[in-house]
Every structure is written in C-alpha cells, then in structure tokens.
Image (cartoon, rainbow, N blue to C red):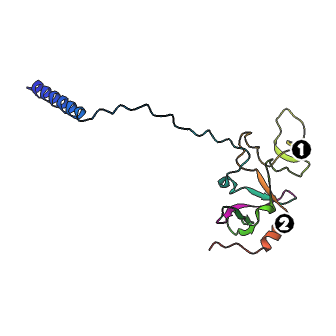
Amino acid sequence: MRSKYVLAGLLASTMLCVGASAQQAPAPRTAPPAQAQVAPAYKHSGEWRASKLIGVNVYNQQNEKIGDINEILLAPDGKIAGVILGVGGFLGMGEHDVLVKLDQLKFVNEPVRTTAATQPTRPAPANTTGTGTATTTAANTNRPARVANEKWYPDHAVINATKDQLKAMPQFKYN
C-alpha cells in the first residue's frame, strides 16, 4: 500500500518538472556578447582617504600632541574649506573644536620622534647587568611604524601653534 503512494508521488513530481521545463522558451540565437570594457584597477599615487584623516594626531613644532582631526569641511565646489581640530580635553570630554585652514597643517608620513635622550622601557632580561631598565635612544618613536604598503593616510600632522593658542581661537560650533 505504501509503495503505491510513493510511486504516485514520484510520478506527479516528474510530471510537474516536465511541465515547468516545457514552459521555457528557447533562447534566440544571437551573436556572442562583445567583451565588456573593464576599467583597470586604480593605482594609488599618493592620495589620502579623507575618512582616514579623521583621528590623525596633530602635534606642535616641539612634537607635543595638541589634538587631533575631528572633521574635514568641504565647500560646495568640492574644495576643502577647513579642518576641525579637537584640542585638549580627555577622552573627548571638554575638547575645544577649532577651524583651521588646510594649508596651516603639514602632514608627515614618518612616526613622531621622541626628544628625550633616553627612555625607560620594560625591565632588562636577567642576564644583563644594570639598574633593571633598558634605555633607548632618541631614534625610537612613540608608536610602531605602519606597514610599508599602507599609504592611504599620513602618520600625523604638524601645526605652527601651541595648544594655548588654539584654545584661545573661537570655538567651532556645528549648527
């Protein structure tokens, strides 16, 4: 009895499949499609991504961090109208936003250099002698260098102003 139902089900499903495939019209014979023009991959030649500039640290001439880039303002014609720097504050609280012209910033690709002659680092290994701290030279940086092929944004920016001078500027307000 069961085999009768199984056989009827298989027969019905076969008929449905044949009917569905019979409804498709054959594709008209045409010439093979022409090869579409594929644009070559973009070769980066020194441009920076604006989205990566947000958050770039800004230093003064003495390599002291004075803030970071919070926003880039564009004029209706697409040119950069200015850069909003966040100065001071702690974890975004109490930050003073100021608008500066892009030509006031000098972008630098190399990491910031320290000015101290020596810096304490982690404790020295047990097989060395000394005070228990290793020292490094002024050539060390505050953070590791970026990957060599990562060139879509600068390491930091430098402005010829102090933190106090920037804080004395009128605060930029988003309307």
Checking the image for residue 162, the label placed there is 2
Q: For this view, does 70 lie left or right of residue 124?
A: left
Residue at (87%, 43%) from the top-left corner?
Answer: 136
Q: Is residue 91 visible?
A: no
| Quarter of the image where one finds residue 4 | top left
Looking at the picture, how far across and down is residue 147, in whole percent? 72, 40
The residue nearer to you, when weighing 148 against 23, is: 23
Name the image quarter holding the C terminus.
bottom right
Residue occupying the far right of the picture: 117
Q: Nearer the viewer, residue 153 or 112?
A: 153
Q: What residue is disc 1 on?
A: 137
Describe the element under mark 2 as helix, strand or loop.
Answer: loop
Three-letter residue code for mark 2: Thr
- Measuring from the top left, give residue 10's x and y in whole percent: 17, 27
Magenta-colored segment: predominant secondary structure: strand
In which quadrant of the rendered view does residue 124 lie?
A: top right
Start and end of the magenta stretch? 62-76
Q: Is residue 141 left or right of residue 4?
A: right
Residue type indicated by callout 1: Thr
- Residue 68 lies in magenta, yes or no? yes
Give residue 89's position: percent from left, percent from top.
72, 66
Q: Residues within 10 Å of mark 1 (few under 14, many from 20)?
A: few
- Position of residue 65 relative to residue 138, above or below, is below
